[in-house]
């Protein structure tokens, strides 16, 4: 028996600020790779190795998140953290 579906769904990609956004969902990890050049785990480890305190690392991440959320708000994307 053939399953009847909605037909082919067109997937929508947008290239905004140098990274791809899939169906109006922007991902923080993609933003980090594009803006900073690494995933959060690598960034965090590098900051700790450089002597940053936990509070300073959290403050740095909060700043990145604020920038990411602003970018999402400006373009009407759902932020995926």
Image: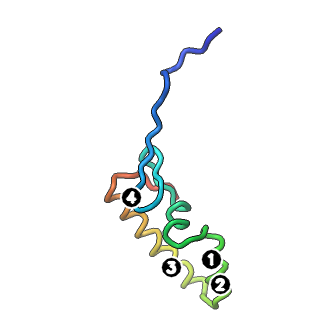
Q: Residue at image x 44%, y 41%?
A: 12
Instruction: Mark 1 or mark 3: name the one nearer the start of the chain.
Output: 1
Mark 3 falls on what kind of element? helix
Mark 4 falls on what kind of element? helix
**CA distance separating discs 1 and 3:** 9 Å
Q: Quickly name the residue at label 1.
A: 44
Instruction: Mark 4 or mark 2: name the one nearer the start of the chain.
Output: 2
Q: Quickly name the residue at label 4.
A: 72
Instruction: Mark 4 or mark 3: name the one nearer the start of the chain.
Output: 3
**CA distance separating discs 1 and 4:** 23 Å
Q: Residue at image x 41%, y 69%?
A: 66
Q: Quickly name the residue at label 2.
A: 48
Give how far across and how far down residue 65 sits, in percent. 46, 68
Depicted 49 relative to depicted 15: above or below: below
Q: Quadrant of residue 16?
A: bottom left
Depicted 29 relative to depicted 35: above or below: above
Give how far across and how far down residue 1 sits, in percent. 65, 8
Judged left or right of residue 48, residue 16 is left
The residue furthest top is 1
Query: How packed is label 4: few (under 14 Cα within 10 Å), some, or many (20 or more)?
Result: many
Residue placed most toward the observer, 44 or 56: 44
Q: Are marks 1 and 4 in contact (CB under 8 Å)?
A: no
Give how far across and how far down residue 15 sits, in percent. 42, 54
The residue furthest bottom is 51
Q: Are marks 4 and 3 in contact (CB under 8 Å)?
A: no
Instruction: Mark 1 or mark 4: name the one nearer the start of the chain.
Output: 1
Query: How packed is label 1: few (under 14 Cα within 10 Å), some, or many (20 or more)?
Result: some
Q: Quickly name the residue at label 3.
A: 60
Mark 1 falls on what kind of element? helix
**CA distance separating discs 4 and 3:** 19 Å
**CA distance separating discs 2 and 1:** 6 Å
Q: Are marks 3 and 2 in contact (CB under 8 Å)?
A: no
């Amino acid at each position: 028996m053939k399953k009847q579906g909605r037909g082919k769904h067109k997937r929508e990609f947008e290239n905004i600020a140098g990274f791809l956004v899939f169906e109006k969902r922007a991902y923080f990890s993609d933003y980090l790779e594009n803006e900073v050049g690494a995933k959060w785990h690598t960034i965090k480890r590098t900051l700790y190795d450089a002597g940053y305190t936990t509070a300073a690392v959290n403050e740095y991440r909060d700043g990145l998140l604020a920038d990411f959320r602003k970018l999402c708000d400006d373009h009407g994307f759902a932020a995926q953290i």
